[in-house]
Amino acid sequence: MFLDDYLSQIECVVKRMKQKKQDALEVFEWFRLYVIYTKLEPSIGHQELCLLLSHGGKVMDEHISLLINAGLLTRQLIDSSMYWFAIPSIGSVLKGLSQGRKELLSLLHRRRYKEMMLAPLEKKRLRLSPLDMRFHLRDLIGSGHLQTVPTPTGLVVRATKD
């Protein structure tokens, strides 16, 4: 994700929190100014996070809880004193991605030769995914789960053998 896009996600979180009448919203500004611009790795330790946030003011556990509840940080399962930087509301996108993959692969596996012409396949609608069929086709072709075969009548998409 680009930094500008991530910063706009932080702004959306702040707007959402203002509507919920949350307190201590200054921590989001501290997070943006002192943490995001200085820490480019995907994770950060608790001590380092507190140190960087303290440049903006007195850091309390409620501030870090607010960042976690907003979806900007998640605790690492292995080491509870470490946090991953997270993308807010990414769950619905990932759910749509995995369900779309399953639905498309299931559609092809139900066919007799586990293949279908590309043009009519692109026109099909997926029930479980908000993402476009073409997106899922490119995703599965790129990951090697599907392959394209040129034929005289056009491209055929075939499920690869696992």
Image: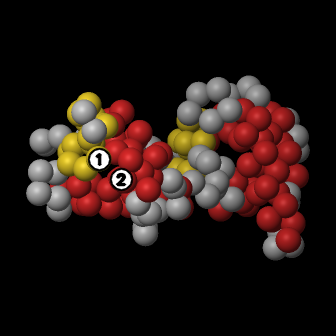
Residue that lies at the very extreme toward the bottom in this rendered image: 20
145 displayed left or right of 71: left
Does residue 56 appear to the left or right of 135 in the view shown? right
Task: Give how far across and how far down residue 11 sits, in percent.
Answer: 82, 51
* Residue 86 position within the rendered picture, expressed as x and y whole percent measured from the top left: 59, 46
Picture residue at 32% right of the left edge, 61% below the top: 103
* Residue at figure coordinates x 77%, y 35% from the top left: 4
Task: Give the percent coordinates (x, y) of residue 57.
Answer: 88, 44
In this orientation, which residue lies closer to the viewer: 48 or 93?
A: 93
Colour scheme of the picture: secondary structure
Callout 2: few (<14), some (14-19), or many (20+) C-alpha neighbours within 10 Å?
A: some
Per the image, the residue denoted by label 2 is: 121
Q: Amino acid at mark 1?
A: Met
User: Are the two marked residues, 1 and 2, in contact with CB atoms closer than 8 angstroms?
Assistant: yes
Amino acid residing under circle 2: Leu
Against 93, residue 52 (above or below) is above
The quarter of the rendered structure image containing the C terminus is: top left
User: Which is nearer the eye, 12 or 66?
Assistant: 12
Say above or below: 29 vs 148.
Answer: below
Instruction: Find residue 157 and report its horizontal and vertical position in percent.
Output: 27, 42
Image point (74%, 26%), residue name: 38
Q: Secondary structure at mark 1?
A: strand
The quadrant of the rendering that contains the N terminus is top right
Q: Is residue 2 left or right of residue 21?
A: left
Q: Which residue is at a point 73% across and 40% down the rendered structure image?
A: 5
Query: Can residue 144 be seen in this snapshot?
Result: no
Which numbered tag is attached to residue 117? 1
The reply to whether residue 148 is in sight is yes
Quarter of the image for residue 55 reads top right
**Of residues 141 and 48, the one drawn nearer to the viewer in this rendering:** 141
Badge 1 density bin: few <14, some 14–19, many ≥20, Cα 10 Å: some
